[in-house]
């Protein structure tokens, strides 16, 4: 960095002017202006699909803007690549942290620095010195010779931050930094951010739930559908106004009628326990009831969901569907008992991306369409097509690969697979992650419709407006335990946020 | 000793080797002698050099099965070229020629894998037959027993030879120095250079490597070229020490080599592997290949023994990892 | 360009091109009845191995033990025959012994496959390692059983499977056609086949879709082992002997044919018709080269080159149709 950069501290470190990005015919960013001062903490808020990720990619040099101006450190960059961007001091910490699991903490921290310095020879001693220095700077104590694969998520994130610092970062971009952290870890992260700001390092938070980071940020930018819809000092925003800007809706969906007729008991879980994941989990669910389970990542909510479906074997406890107990740790037994599970990560867990839409829907119905050992392809396809129509999946060709669909339509396909099996209980983990606003509303309608048909539904989500708008009852999970039960309509989002975080 | 120390492949393999030697000595006291040791060392040279190259490829996250074909090609072509042009070429120039040819063929692998992103097993299966087919069709399929004098000189050069007080004859050929050189060089590259750490990095996570700005293609290209160069060296040593350029030799050895490397703790998924582990793996395979009979197992069971070693040596850690993953979920 | 959009159609063109070229280069010999029949006798043994490879590759695995399984099965059958049925006995008397020997071979193949399946499914060993190790073990057993030499001295009826004809069609060809058809039906018309394909496309999603992946993999490798055993019996019949190291070059060939036939080595894609076309083009090529007095070694060269060229061709994006780069790439 040239010395004169420090003389111009009053000028912004990053200035984006009228930045436009097209993907084919789709506009991802539409004339966005963003400025970031040195030492400033900035929130970039927006729902999935709002253009946040595109903006990061442009700053990181991974994608090129279609139009507009990008200034970093007072220099206008017409073409940016990851190396130029890194050399200018822009460091991105991705959600997966992009670390090397097989290498030591020291080496992970020093790696980018070594590369930019053009070091030909590796020195573990030098790496360790650098790593210790940086870890000390943020006041964290992690063994520098430990392999990264053995670290907790929070420590991995700290290593990623240290790596950025070791490379003389002047702007650290954090993509959804708090999703995987516990309350205490978020606190300590915020403390570290304050230290970075004191050192003149700017931080850009990219997130869709910002209540906890609002307190360290000076400025907020809100994106919606590729446009900057609001910006200003953080003090002018609160969780509710942020949500309003992000979704573009003034009023949240009306909560479901709590006037649930007394229905039959469907699922009874008692004393479910899994070492290191969750303990002493007991709850019940009635037919047609929508039960929300919310908690921070790492609270054990996903492990619990998987245990209910048998993908994770609980150590002890019992599960009963309609008074029949179900074998633990056996997805087939769970399926036969009428349980369905739509996983969190559609792309890696939920769908067979390179297989046809029809196959993705009908994979659970193969045995029902088999006679004398052979599949009746006609009835199989017919049934799948039927479900696709009922869920209004927009697909030009149902025999095309499922990867050709948009996020919202993909999620409908994942739902259709289980609906085709006529389940009694559906577990939906993050049902609207990564789908556009319109599809999200449709998926919520589907959930309500299923509930009216008497299907019990468990929604696991950290999207609080979603939980509040579709669930009859909400369970809060913390450190592997159910700590709170809330009836819908008795609580608003601010209060729920508070209860989750406390 | 920490628990981790006992869980490491190196430790387990070393224990098996010690046990094997104890059994062998118990059933035949002559096993424990300078003669046996020098014979086993001689038998380890070519396998060891191959294994070091194969280990490097595994660390980078790939697999190479073409190195035996590269070795034969480089050895035979450099022999034929030398005989046809300057038969009196000193051995180190013939060796250089063979290494350069090996590196060139390895570079072809590297090009196909790094530039076009083709699956490494299939590519190297393909190049294995291309190299071998080309050699036998266009260069020659005759065994050559009158080697250039330089190669014969090399095979006669010894670091040490003699007879122990107990009357055991031993000889350590110069080729052993080549193995030592390769071991030290590779260890240095892997542990002491940024290039080496980049090889570990791409084996650990290609995506992360790209994001920190590692030139993944260049690293991959280097890895396959280096493995090719080592194969060229191993090939010419094999020819010299066997005093014959046999275009049909070596091919078929690749699975034993990979077995040795995997036993030594390298993982097929990439990112893990050490020089010391690889050498231990080679030692075990060589012991099984040469001395099974000493512990009372007929040599016809050799292949069963190696297969079982692979299955146990890789199955145990895989099973432990699976158990650990189930507990953690 | 549309014709070129699938690997199978590209392959069909290659096959026809090779056939036409060879016919043109040496019309009287390549198209002679003698050559056509001898081709029909030659390819089934490795083509059956390629079918086994296809099935395991569809699940994203590989079976490097097929040669070991084939030889072990054949050695078991040969040892049984050689010791139970004297070489001189008549065809009719030998049939029960033949049935016994063939049955034993198939059982050996299935058991060997089950071992592979257990290693891959239960121990979660990478298929390359599992089948590499087990292949050595199977070969090793065959060596240990025979002491490394060939087992010979069978009744004449053994020759029928590899050298006989039925309605003047070579029997090995019929066996191959039947197995290819069976595999095609299995993959496209049964729940098992669809599940195997889907598992290959995304093993994790298969788990979340409540597919019993352990049972699935076990069955896949058992079938692969049984197919390998059939190939072993054909080889034994044609060689009139069984030995632990027959057909060692077939492993490469089997992988090559499967990949050439458009089977994705990462799993989830592949069609039997493609594999059949690949077998035919390989056989035309090697027969034709034989006519042209090209050495056996050149065949190996050409096979390898063909494999790499086809893979390179497959990396080209042939379909420029609606590249829907939806901004769903925006996942956070």
Image (spheres, coloured by chain):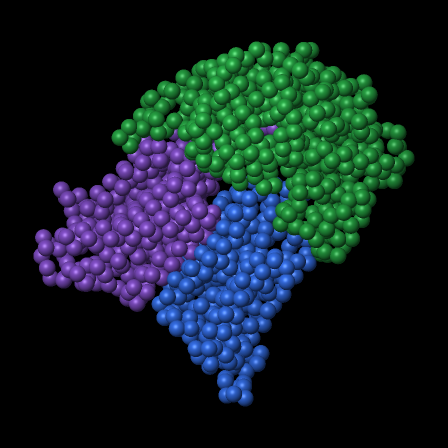
Chain colours: A green, B blue, C purple
The residue drawn where x is 14% and y is 62% is: C86
B51 relative to B292 in the view: left or right: right
Task: Kindly give the residue lying farthest to the right in the view shown.
Answer: A7
The residue drawn where x is 45% and y is 31% is: A325
Residue B248 horizontal/vertical position (percent): 39, 64
**A123 or A451: nearer the eye?**
A451
Residue B175 seen from this side = yes
Residue A449 seen from this side = no
How many numbered discs?
0
Residue C175 horizontal/vertical position (percent): 23, 44
A231 relative to C269 in the view: left or right: right
Is the residue A329 above or below the residue A37 in the image?
A: below
Is the residue B179 above or below the residue B116 in the image?
A: below
Residue A495 position by quadrant:
top right
B257 relative to C91 in the view: left or right: right
Residue A280 position by quadrant:
top right
Q: Quadrant of the C terminus of chain C?
A: top right
Q: In which quarter of the image is the N terminus of chain C?
A: top left
Residue C217 position by quadrant:
top left
Is the residue A333 above or below the residue A439 in the image?
A: below
Residue C14 horizontal/vertical position (percent): 36, 39
**A250 or C177: nearer the eye?**
A250
The residue drawn where x is 62% and y is 13% is: A255
The residue drawn where x is 19% and y is 59% is: C81
Residue B168 horizontal/vertical position (percent): 50, 85
């Amino acid at each position: 960095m040239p010395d004169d950069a420090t003389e111009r501290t009053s000028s912004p470190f990053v200035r984006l002017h009228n930045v436009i990005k097209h993907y084919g015919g789709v506009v991802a960013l539409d004339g966005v202006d963003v400025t970031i001062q040195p030492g400033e903490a900035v929130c970039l808020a927006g729902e999935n699909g709002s253009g946040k990720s595109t903006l990061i990619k442009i700053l990181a040099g991974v994608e090129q803007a279609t139009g507009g101006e990008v200034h970093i450190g007072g220099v206008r960059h017409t073409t940016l690549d990851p190396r130029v961007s890194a050399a200018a001091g822009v460091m991105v910490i991705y959600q997966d942290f992009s670390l090397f699991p097989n290498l030591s903490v020291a080496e992970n921290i020093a790696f980018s620095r070594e590369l930019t310095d053009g070091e030909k020879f590796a020195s573990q001693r030098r790496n360790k010195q650098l790593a210790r220095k940086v870890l000390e700077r943020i006041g964290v104590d992690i063994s520098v010779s430990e392999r990264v694969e053995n670290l907790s998520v929070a420590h991995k994130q700290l290593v990623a931050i240290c790596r950025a610092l070791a490379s003389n970062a002047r702007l650290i971009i954090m993509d959804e930094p708090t999703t995987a952290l516990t309350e205490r870890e978020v606190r300590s992260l915020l403390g570290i951010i304050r230290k970075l700001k004191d050192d003149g390092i700017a931080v850009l938070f990219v997130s869709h739930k910002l209540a906890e980071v609002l307190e360290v940020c000076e400025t907020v930018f809100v994106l919606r559908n590729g446009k900057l819809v609001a910006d200003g000092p953080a003090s002018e925003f609160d969780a509710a106004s942020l949500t309003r800007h992000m979704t573009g809706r003034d009023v949240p969906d009306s909560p479901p009628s709590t006037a649930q007729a007394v229905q039959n008991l469907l699922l009874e879980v008692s004393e479910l326990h899994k070492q290191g994941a969750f303990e002493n989990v007991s709850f019940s669910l009635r037919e047609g009831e929508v039960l929300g389970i919310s908690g921070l990542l790492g609270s054990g909510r996903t492990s619990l969901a998987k245990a209910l479906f048998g993908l994770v074997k609980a150590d002890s406890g019992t599960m009963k569907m309609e008074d029949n107990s179900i074998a633990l740790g056996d997805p087939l037994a769970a399926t036969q008992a009428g349980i369905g599970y739509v996983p969190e990560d559609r792309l890696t867990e939920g769908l067979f991306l390179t297989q046809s839409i029809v196959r993705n829907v009908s994979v659970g119905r193969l045995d029902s369409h088999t006679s004398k050992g052979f599949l009746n392809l006609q009835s199989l396809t017919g049934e799948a097509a039927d479900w696709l129509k009922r869920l209004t999946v927009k697909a030009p060709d149902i025999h095309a690969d499922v990867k050709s669909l948009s996020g919202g339509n993909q999620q409908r396909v994942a739902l259709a697979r289980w609906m085709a099996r006529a389940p009694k209980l559906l577990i939906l983990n993050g049902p609207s992650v990564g789908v556009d606003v319109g599809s999200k509303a449709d998926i919520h309608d589907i959930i309500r419709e299923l509930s009216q048909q008497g299907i019990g539904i468990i929604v696991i989500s950290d999207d609080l407006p979603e939980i509040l708008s579709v669930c009859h009852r909400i369970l809060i999970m913390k450190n592997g335990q159910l700590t709170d039960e809330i009836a819908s309509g008795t609580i608003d989002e601010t209060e729920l946020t508070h209860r989750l975080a406390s | 000793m920490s628990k981790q120390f006992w869980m490491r492949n190196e430790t387990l393999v070393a224990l098996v080797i010690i046990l094997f030697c104890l059994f062998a000595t118990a059933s035949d006291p002559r096993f424990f002698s300078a003669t046996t040791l020098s014979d086993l060392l001689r038998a380890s040279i070519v396998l060891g050099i191959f294994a070091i190259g194969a280990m490097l490829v595994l660390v980078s996250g790939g697999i190479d099965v073409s190195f035996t074909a590269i070795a034969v090609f480089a050895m035979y072509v450099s022999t034929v070229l030398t005989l046809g042009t300057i038969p009196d070429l000193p051995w180190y120039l013939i060796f250089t020629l063979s290494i350069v040819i090996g590196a060139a063929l390895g570079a072809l692998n590297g090009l196909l894998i790094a530039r076009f992103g083709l699956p490494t097993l299939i590519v190297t299966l393909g190049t294995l037959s291309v190299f071998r087919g080309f050699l036998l069709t266009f260069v020659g399929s005759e065994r050559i027993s009158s080697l250039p004098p330089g190669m014969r000189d090399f095979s006669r050069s010894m670091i040490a030879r003699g007879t122990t007080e107990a009357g055991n004859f031993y000889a350590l050929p110069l080729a052993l120095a080549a193995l030592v050189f390769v071991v030290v060089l590779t260890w240095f590259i892997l542990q002491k250079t940024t290039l080496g750490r980049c090889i570990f990095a791409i084996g650990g996570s290609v995506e992360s490597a790209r994001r920190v700005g590692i030139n993944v293609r260049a690293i991959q290209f280097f890895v396959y070229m280096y493995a090719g160069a080592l194969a060229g060296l191993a090939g010419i040593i094999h020819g010299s020490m066997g005093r014959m350029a046999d275009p049909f030799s070596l091919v078929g050895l690749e699975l034993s080599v990979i077995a040795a490397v995997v036993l030594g703790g390298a993982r097929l998924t990439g990112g893990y592997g050490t020089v010391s582990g690889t050498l231990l793996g080679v030692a075990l395979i060589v012991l099984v290949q040469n001395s099974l009979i000493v512990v009372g197992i007929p040599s016809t069971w050799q292949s069963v023994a190696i297969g079982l070693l692979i299955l146990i040596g890789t199955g145990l850690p895989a099973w432990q990892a699976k158990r650990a993953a189930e507990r953690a979920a | 360009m549309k014709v070129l959009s699938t690997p199978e159609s590209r392959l069909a063109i290659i096959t026809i091109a090779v056939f036409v070229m060879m016919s043109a280069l040496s019309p009287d010999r390549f198209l002679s009845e003698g050559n056509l029949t001898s081709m029909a006798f030659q390819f089934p043994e490795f083509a059956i191995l390629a079918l086994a490879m296809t099935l395991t590759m569809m699940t994203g695995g590989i079976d490097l033990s097929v040669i070991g399984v084939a030889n072990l099965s054949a050695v078991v059958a040969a040892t049984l025959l050689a010791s139970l049925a004297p070489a001189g006995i008549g065809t009719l008397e030998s049939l029960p012994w033949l049935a016994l020997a063939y049955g034993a071979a198939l059982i050996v193949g299935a058991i060997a496959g089950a071992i592979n399946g257990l290693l891959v499914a239960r121990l979660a060993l990478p298929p390359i390692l599992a089948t590499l190790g087990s292949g050595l073990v199977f070969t090793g057993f065959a060596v240990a059983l025979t002491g490394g030499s060939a087992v010979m001295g069978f009744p004449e009826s053994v020759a029928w499977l590899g050298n006989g004809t039925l309605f003047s069609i070579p029997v090995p060809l019929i066996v191959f056609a039947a197995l290819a058809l069976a595999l095609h039906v299995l993959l496209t018309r049964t729940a098992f086949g669809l599940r195997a394909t889907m598992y290959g496309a995304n093993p994790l999603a298969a788990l979340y879709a409540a597919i019993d992946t352990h049972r699935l993999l076990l069955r896949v490798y058992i079938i692969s082992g049984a197919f390998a055993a059939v190939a072993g019996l054909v080889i034994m019949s044609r060689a009139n002997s069984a030995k632990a190291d027959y057909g060692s070059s077939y492993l490469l060939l089997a992988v090559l044919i499967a990949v050439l036939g458009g089977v994705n080595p990462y799993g989830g894609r592949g069609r039997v018709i493609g594999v059949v076309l690949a077998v035919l083009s390989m056989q035309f090529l090697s027969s034709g080269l034989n006519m042209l007095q090209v050495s056996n070694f050149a065949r190996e060269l050409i096979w390898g080159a063909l494999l790499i060229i086809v893979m390179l061709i497959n990396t080209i994006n042939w379909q420029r149709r609606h590249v829907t780069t939806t901004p769903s790439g925006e996942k956070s």
